[in-house]
Each structure stands twice: as structure tokens, then as C-alpha cells.
Image: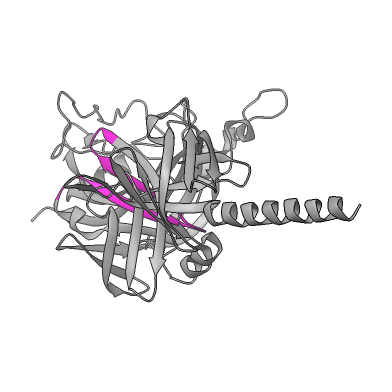
Amino acid sequence: MKKATIILIVLLSLIKVTNAQDSKISGSWLVTKIVVGDQVDEPLFVIDYSANGSIITQGIDVGSWSHNQKEEKLIMTSDMDKDFVGDCKIINLNEKELNFEKGDQKWFLSRLNMDEIAKINSESGLIGSWKFADDANDDSTRVLTFEAPDSFTFIEKEPGMESRTGGMWIYNQEEKSLLLIGRIEQVRGKNRILTISKKELVLENAGVEIIIRKSDDSSQKIERLNFTGDDFFDENGDYKYDSEEGKLPWTDPFEMLMSLVNTSQLEYNFSTLVEGTKVFETKKLTADVKTDKDEQSVSIDFIFYGYDRYNLPDDTQLPPNILDFNYYNRLYPLKENSFRVAGQEKLTTPSGTFDCTVIESVGTSEEKYKLWMINDKPGIYAKIIEDKDGMFGHYYIYELKNIITNN
């Protein structure tokens, strides 16, 4: 009985030692370097050696691992990726580092303390959306959004193209550095922090200085439109707001003509929300205004597709937009939509402060609008919000910047 007890104690001790060794391997590791001969690669990706024996990278279970303590080998198997196949000779293993040889490769890994990373990241002041400052000089918009505890999203928009990638971020307060792990150009890898404040972050990456600015406190406020097309009809399918047309401030096309007779252009700030962020892309749109008292005609360029005659996309024409005095569009210059009057509001824009009638409207393709009609300036909107849900949704704001009159 005594001999059996001694054997049991020895077995338990061996199991305890083996588990202790395995605990040194299990966890999250950053692959900092892979050396093959004279070639050095810095791949910067994370491997999770799970306690259950799984190998997980980029959220994918790619294989399994075990530790041969006697031969000091890390044994990896995978049917998905040959990088995770082989008997690896462990050169160094401690609480912070794991180095091993795999064939002619030498791997260098650093342990990641995910709880500590989460705490430091949360206190960094970086969580939120940041916009690259140099994008003001071209047609691209790049937004980097830091999320808790350690993930980021990088969005790059150009005319006709948008890409989204993601990865992991680690803020090091002592080193004043920011590590970005993922498919992201210019700031990938280890960045030295030159300046950090609530509004601006200046990084240095490979000798290049990069300025990004916080965008959460945008001057444009996001007001999502929560009504639906069903709200405009009763249970019998009948339109509920036939009487609303009499509440509109613009009812006389001749009054509109005379109001605009000395106006040559209307300038608007057109802001597009970068979905998934609080960041707006903003550009100026100019609508030419033409009036003819003899012909009793008014024409205001239709700019509410997000472009004007001065920046037309290729093979695109402005929609015709001449007022027909025999049939007056109640929501001119927008198309015939279901609408209702939501109230009166004094609204301040870059062009001034105006008394407005506020309209809520739904288009034929499920676009939702909120429109501010300037009461004493027929034909001129102070502001328009266009909001569309869904996979191909969008959020636009048109805000009056300037009313240009004839000399």
C-alpha cells in the first residue's frame, strides 16, 4: 500500500510539472520575428495556444499543439496551414518569451497579457474614431477606429471604392508606442508616439510622421430618422396627411420666382457619414440658379445626388430641374414623396439663422428625409438629412453654406 502511494505521488508530481510547463506555453503570443538564414521577417501576428490544445490565429482554429517536455519540443499539427505543422525545438521558454526552431526557421514570440492590454488600452484615450489629416489634399478618406478591449477597424474610401480591414492594437504607455497588428498600410507595426492629446495623435512609422485627428466630436451631429413609410398610412392603407400641403411655406411658384430673381447660386456643405464611425466626409456643392420673369421659369440645379455641374462623375448629367408653373411640385426640388409637417424650428447654418418649416418625408426607394424649408425664402432649403437603412444604406447631410446673389 505504501509503495502504491509513493507511485501515485510521483505520478501526480509529474503531471503537475508537465502542466506547469504547458502553462508556460498556453496563452496568447505575438510573433515578432522569423529568421531564415540572413533573412529577417517581422510578420506581427498573434497565436493563441489554448489550454485545450488548439492553435487559434485571427480567430480561426488552425490546428493543435502539444508539449514534449522530455525533448523540449513544441509539436504542432494542422490540415489548414503548413506554418503550423512540425516538431519545433524550444530554445527559450519563460514567462515572457518563446523561441523555437522549426526546420530552417527561427521563431521569436512575446507573450501577451490580454487583461493588462485591455486595461492600458482603456485608459489610453484612443478609443473612438480618428481621421488621417493628409486626406484633405485628395479624394480619399481614411478612418481608424479603436475599440475596446483591443480591436481596430480601418476604413479607406475613394470615389467608387470602399475597403474595410481590422486587427489588434496595443498601447504601451511606458514606451510611448502604439502597435497595430493587421492589414493596414502606413501605420502597420510599431509606431512611436510623438504627440497624444484628446484631439490629435502624431505617430512616427519607419521615419514618416503621420497625423490623425479625433473625429468623435464632429460638428455634424448624427440624427437618425426612425420613422418609416408605414407611419404615413392608416390601417386601411389610406394616406393620413392629405391636409399637410396647406401647411407648407412654399405654395406659390411665382413667389418662388420673385424670391430667387437676384440669386445666382446656392452653396451647400454635403456631408457623408462613413458608416460604422462618427466621421463625415464633407465637400462643397454649388447649385446654379436661373430665373426668367418673361418666361416665368425657375431652374435650380439638382445637387441632391451628391454632385454638382462642377464635379460631375464621368458619363453623368445633372437631372433636369425646371419648375413647371402648371404643375407645382410641393417638395420642389425633390421628387413627389409622402410627407408630413413636423413643426417649426429656428435653424442656424453657416449661411445664417432662418425660421424653417420642418418636413419628414419618405421616398420611393425607402430613403427617409428631414427637410428644413426656409419660410421666407421659397425654393431654398436650410438643411436636408437623407437616411437610408440596409446593406446599401447611407446617411447624408446637405447644409446651406452661402446664398450668392447677382452683382
Front position in the image: 175 or 132: 175
Q: Residue 40: x percent and y percent? A: 21, 49
Magenta stretch: give its range: 138-161
Question: Which residue is located at x 18 percent, y 48 percent?
Answer: 265
Compared to residue 253, the image places residue 324 above or below, namely above
Q: Residue at point 27% right, 63% down?
A: 191
Q: Can residue 273 be seen in this view?
A: no
**Residue drawn where x is 58% and y is 35% of the image:** 228
Q: Residue furthest right?
A: 1
Viewer-side residue, 230 vs 312: 312
Question: Quarter of the image containing the C terminus?
Answer: bottom left
**What is the x, y in percent for residue 185?**
24, 48
Q: In this view, does 296 lie to the left or right of 338?
A: left
Viewer-closest of 44 and 221: 44
Q: How is the model colour-coded?
A: one colour
Q: Is 310 displayed left or right of 399 in the figure?
A: left
The x, y position of residue 390, in whole percent, is 49, 32
Q: Is residue 143 magenta?
A: yes
Q: In the image, 235: left or right of 166?
A: right
Residue 6 location, quadrant: bottom right
Q: Position of residue 245 (x, y in %)?
A: 51, 38
Q: Which residue lies furthest to the left in this view?
A: 407
Q: In this view, does 230 lie above or below 48?
A: above
Magenta stretch: dominant secondary structure: strand
Q: Is residue 78 in view?
A: yes
Residue drawn 16% across and 34% down?
312
Verify whether residue 195 appears in magenta: no
